[in-house]
Amino acid sequence: MTEFFNLVVAGLVTGALYAILASGLTLTYQTSGVFNFGQGGVAFSTAYLFFQLNTGQGLPVVPSAILCVGVFAPALGWLLHRILFNPLRDASIAARMVATLGLLIALPALCLWITAMLREKASLDLPTVEDVFRFPGLGPSPKEIYKLGNGLILDSDKLAILGAAIFSALLLWYLVRRTRIGLEMRASVSRPAIAALRGVDPDRASAVSWITSCGLAGLVGVLLAPMFGLANFTYNTLLFVSIPAVVLARFASIPLAMAGGLLLGVAQNLVDGYVDLDITGFPTAVPFIILFLLLFFFGAERGRSAGTTLEEKPPAEDPTEVSPWRRRALWGVVTVGLLSYTAWGATDFWAGLLAEGLATAIVLMSFTVVTGIGGMVSLAQVAFVLAGAFTTGILISHDVPYLPALLAGVVVAALTGAVIALPTRRLGGLPLALSTLALAFIGQNLLFQIRDISNGSGGWAIPAPDLGIVDTANPRWMVVMLLVLLGLTIWLVHALRTSSTGRAMLAVRSSDVGAQTNGIAVGRMKLLVFVISAAIAGFGGVLLATTRGRVTNTDYDAFLGLVWLATTITFSIRRPAGAVLAGLVAALAPQAFENIPDSTHFMQILFGLGAIGLARDPDGALAAIGRATQQRRRRQASSTAGATSPAPAAPSPAVAVPVGGDVPTAAGALETAVEPVLRVRGLHAGYNDIEVLHGVDLVIGPGEALALLGSNGAGKTTLCAAIGGLVTPTAGIIELAGEDVTAIPAQRRRRDGIYLAPEGRGIFPDLTVEENLTIWLRDRDERDRAYEAFPSLARRRGQAAGALSGGEQQQLTLAPALVRPPRLLIADEPSLGLAPLVTEQIFAALGQLQQQGTALLIAEEKTRNALSVAGRAAFLTVGHITWAGPTSELDTEALATAYLGTATAGATAGAAAAAPATAATAAVQVAE
């Protein structure tokens, strides 16, 4: 029993480190959408600075800890948020992942390289990691030992870690649950767009989360050093092992992440103590087995998937826009250049490195298939490399010729891809990436440690093939052979992309639901992508092992697979040229920079700079070059066309459908005698390259209600979002009480300006009713007035808003505006999904706001209730205002034209106006 308690206590200590890291990962993922693999780099750099200050400069523990954990790590978190992760908020998951991997590699390298440079160039007496036996921590040195009860042993380092875990839990609980910024962070996580409308700055919430999480990572780094030393590999492993706790928390719950980290540490320690398995890496593999099982059960998306589309934008320069002959000529020039250099300029050493780079390029071509074409992030490519290489090595050791052994290695790698894809293909995004990472670590620490597979530390010999005509043992002929095979691989990838199968893969990548609708077997297509990618990786893996002459289980670890993916994405994941350049750089760059002091770490720093550059252009370097070239061509074509083409004819205006009198302009019909609250002039807006609004004009005066009518898809929601600040206009002006607010985002506008009640309820479903009101109404007296307006909310103030009825949710949306009336309230489909009685209550509240002087813009498909409040109306048809005027002039023909797009026989510009009562009745009949 004593042994059991000692194992549990030791596991709790390790689990406390996992818990702190997991809570930081959860916090940043929830507030920024970035899963920060760079936490390991932050932990190492903070611990290394603490080591230099305390051991190197003799600064006491407390000041060193304050400077490192309290100042350096949080400042680093803020800096990373500003220059790296904030620009990556809308980037693809692969780009976000690569940026954090760049930090994981570059931050430790930067610390070690700066130390080496200062020692060599400035002759400073700075200690190195190799000079120190015991590294300092927050506890006393040497550590103190405590014996409790019957053999239970603790020491000061372990107590410091447990204390830090308790401190971190209390800090996070207080920050998230008891502070204003914590409430804003949770609101930003729940519904970022609604948070912005309510004055919450998502950048501020994200910055605080990065500052906090990096501070926690720095704390972990300082605590870890006395127990495990200052080895970069240790910090990386600790980070990856903590990921199962994040998955257990569903990437959302910080308390569950803390608890999961503690349980993970205990489980790992108990397995290590009681499970006697003669495989070296089995204890390390246990957390990754747990990770894979958790992802298998919890990782699949269970939300709404219809209507979702590809998260990545298409390439800046589509390959089809470039002449095929130009592409072939470029590839030909590069090939001739490489052959010429190999034949007459390269030594055997450099020819061998070039061969290794070409083989690596074939491996990296597998990323072009699985991520570039399939849209899935696989971190298990090293497992396919080793599966193919080990299979080939085993067969060659049994006197099987090279070619059949190579083909067998490719088949085994493809089968391995199928085995991995079968349980993971239902996952997507980050869960898929993490599941393949788990399988890569399981292979590294468990499967490839089996002696019958790896042949121990000696590995398997894979000699160069005997082709008869040429001796591929000569590195120059090896380069020729690999160039041919690389060209064949590029041709196969291109053929796949342009084939019907490739188009089906691209369809699945864009939308699973859309692909299924068109008869594509989504699961089968994802499986095929994995199998093809694994086969290419296995093929390249055999060739890469051939260039080295041998393969061992330490040649290609899971971390190297991350570096491969990051390097490929840095150049371009969608273009075969990106894989080629990444392979050549991976092999040749370390030797090219060998004259630079501590060149290994210098190369890692360059990679980190590449990650920062990726934040500015997530499509990679080749995409940036293609975009610049494309823009230059367009400017040249535009200047040429402008010099030779006549001025274009003015477009014909949209047809207005007034009833009676002259045809008014859309803006003129809504002019008021006093200073308007809202004036919209020539507004153009849309999403990406799709324009939805085509020059909209609106004017609303104080206390006036305007009904914005139109069919579904007319652009009503886009207009409301543009006025509210959620959609940035591409042209036009939005003025609020005479102030131009066109370029001002929603969260930076005055709190008494515009209040948008969006379509589908403007609430935070994960927050309580009280917390929802607190976002806008900070004073308790104001919240009490809101409860007086809607008494049913008072009875549910501690209940999650998502559990309220539809009517109560709409009441919660409007309650803050009733207490603090804005100048303009925009209600987008306020009656959507509500019972008639509740709808009357909602429109009664809108009428009350109007009486208090608030201008109303009510966007509705149905017209009965909107017209009961509004004195003016405007028809929006396909992004144009086609009629605007008093509601008394509405009639059947006008509404029919607005909703159906064609006028009835009696609708003419000069038709007499119907009586107001008759007109209103006819309008309601048409709209309903």
Image (spheres, rainbow, N blue to C red):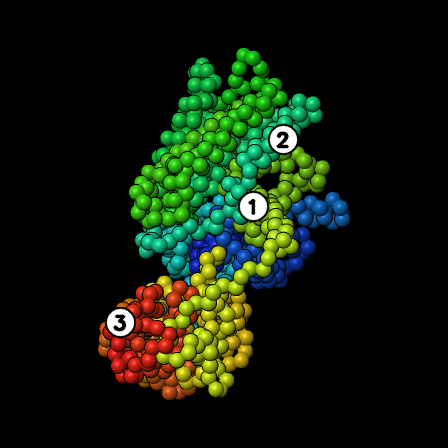
Which of the two labelled residues, at mark 3 and mark 1, occupies the earlier sequence position?
1
- For mark 3, does the 10 Å Cα neighbourhood hold few (<14), some (14 to 19), or many (20 or more) residues? some
Residue under numbered circle 2? 333
Residue located at (30% from left, 81% from top): 914
Q: Position of residue 389 (x, y in %)?
A: 47, 26
| Front position among marks 3 and 1 | 3
Q: Secondary structure at mark 2?
A: helix
What type is the residue that disc 1 sits on? Answer: Ala
Which of the two labelled residues, at mark 2 and mark 1, occupies the earlier sequence position?
2
Q: Nearer the viewer, residue 833 or 385?
A: 833
Q: Quadrant of the C terminus?
A: bottom left
What type is the residue that disc 2 sits on? Answer: Val
Q: Nearer the viewer, residue 819 or 110?
A: 819
Q: Secondary structure at mark 1?
A: helix
Could you tell me how many numbered marks the image carries? 3
What type is the residue that disc 3 sits on? Answer: Val
Residue under numbered circle 3? 926
- For mark 1, does the 10 Å Cα neighbourhood hold few (<14), some (14 to 19), or many (20 or more) residues? many
Residue located at (42% from left, 50% from top): 310
Q: Nearer the viewer, residue 856 or 153?
A: 856
Q: Position of residue 634 (x, y in %)?
A: 59, 50
Disc sitting over residue 623 in the figure = 1
